[in-house]
């Protein structure tokens, strides 16, 4: 369990707070809009109404007690920059700031952000990758080049083993696990036979994964 501070409760900040809470973390949200804060009062651990551009507000929050501080202020880049800088100056352990443009990211990193995220861009990339390939149930990007795809077992693989199919040598991809009824099982036995009802979690270069799925 981690202690999370989220400043700015727009659409992204609200979803972030909700999901962190569902995972059992202690979450505090701060926003100037009282109605937005009240909407999350029953979801998160603590709420506060205030302007985090005011250093007194930042000091009152006890910034150094949080494992992660997220700056999720929407379109007001100047405010995001100021809050990021104040968090760093007041002892934040790790600051993650939301950005919409690369030039914004550069300034945020120079002024105190440990990491910058692009929620809209990242979701667009994930969606385009997933739907560029056939029969992809889920997708997780590891780096811009590598990813994990969840795919159905190809009909031509059913009843055969990874070693028999020579998957790594033939396709330049690796099968790391199988998934059935939402249960993931690491694939440690190269002689295990694939079943039609299970999904496969495959890892590799994204271009190789997409090319392989188009061929199968």
Image: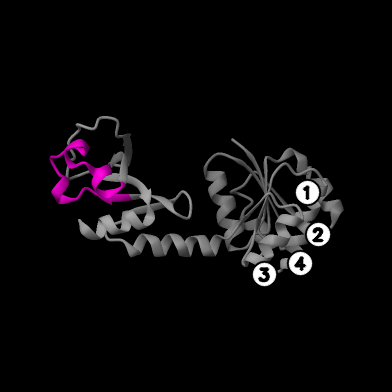
The residue that disc 1 covers is 88
Q: Residue at point 26% right, 46% down?
A: 199
Is any part of residue 32 visible from this angle?
no
The residue that disc 2 covers is 53
| Image position of 98 with respect to 200: above or below | below
> In which quadrant of the rendered view does residue 127 lie?
bottom left
Name the mark nearer the viewer: 4 or 2.
Answer: 4
Is 79 situated left or right of 75 in this image?
right
Residue 20 within the segment the image draws in magenta: no
Earlier-in-chain disc, 2 versus 1 = 2
Report the disc number at residue 78: 4
Q: Secondary structure under badge 2?
A: loop
Magenta stretch, residue numbers: 150-172
Residue 48 in percent (x, y) is at 74, 52
Is 144 situated left or right of 73 in this image?
left
Name the mark nearer the viewer: 2 or 1.
Answer: 1
Q: Nearer the viewer, residue 113 or 26?
A: 113
Q: CA distance from mark 3 to mark 4?
A: 9 Å
| Image position of 115 with respect to 91: above or below | below
Report the disc number at residue 75: 3
Residue 83 in percent (x, y) is at 77, 57
Q: CA distance from mark 2 to mark 1?
A: 13 Å
Q: Mark 3, residues whose alpha carbon is within 10 Å: few (<14), some, or many (≥20)? A: few
């Amino acid at each position: 369990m981690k202690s999370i501070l989220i400043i700015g409760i727009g659409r992204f900040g609200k979803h972030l707070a909700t999901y962190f809470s569902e995972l059992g973390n202690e979450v505090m949200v701060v926003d100037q809009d009282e109605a937005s804060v009240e909407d999350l009062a029953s979801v998160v651990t603590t709420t506060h109404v205030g302007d985090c551009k005011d250093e007194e507000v930042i000091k009152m929050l006890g910034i150094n007690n949080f494992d992660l501080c997220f700056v999720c202020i929407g379109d007001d880049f100047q405010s995001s920059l100021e809050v990021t800088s104040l968090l760093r100056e007041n002892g934040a352990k790790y600051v993650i700031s939301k950005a919409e443009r690369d030039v914004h990211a550069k300034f945020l990193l120079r002024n105190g952000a440990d990491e910058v995220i692009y929620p809209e861009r990242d979701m667009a990339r994930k969606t385009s990758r997933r739907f560029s390939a056939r029969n992809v149930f889920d997708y997780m990007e590891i780096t811009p080049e590598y990813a994990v795809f969840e795919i159905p077992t190809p009909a031509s693989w059913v009843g055969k083993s990874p070693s028999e199919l020579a998957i790594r040598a033939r396709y330049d991809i690796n099968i790391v696990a199988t998934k059935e009824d939402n249960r993931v099982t690491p694939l440690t036995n190269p002689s295990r036979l694939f079943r039609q009802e299970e999904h496969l979690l495959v890892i590799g270069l994204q271009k190789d994964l997409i090319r392989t799925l188009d061929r199968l």
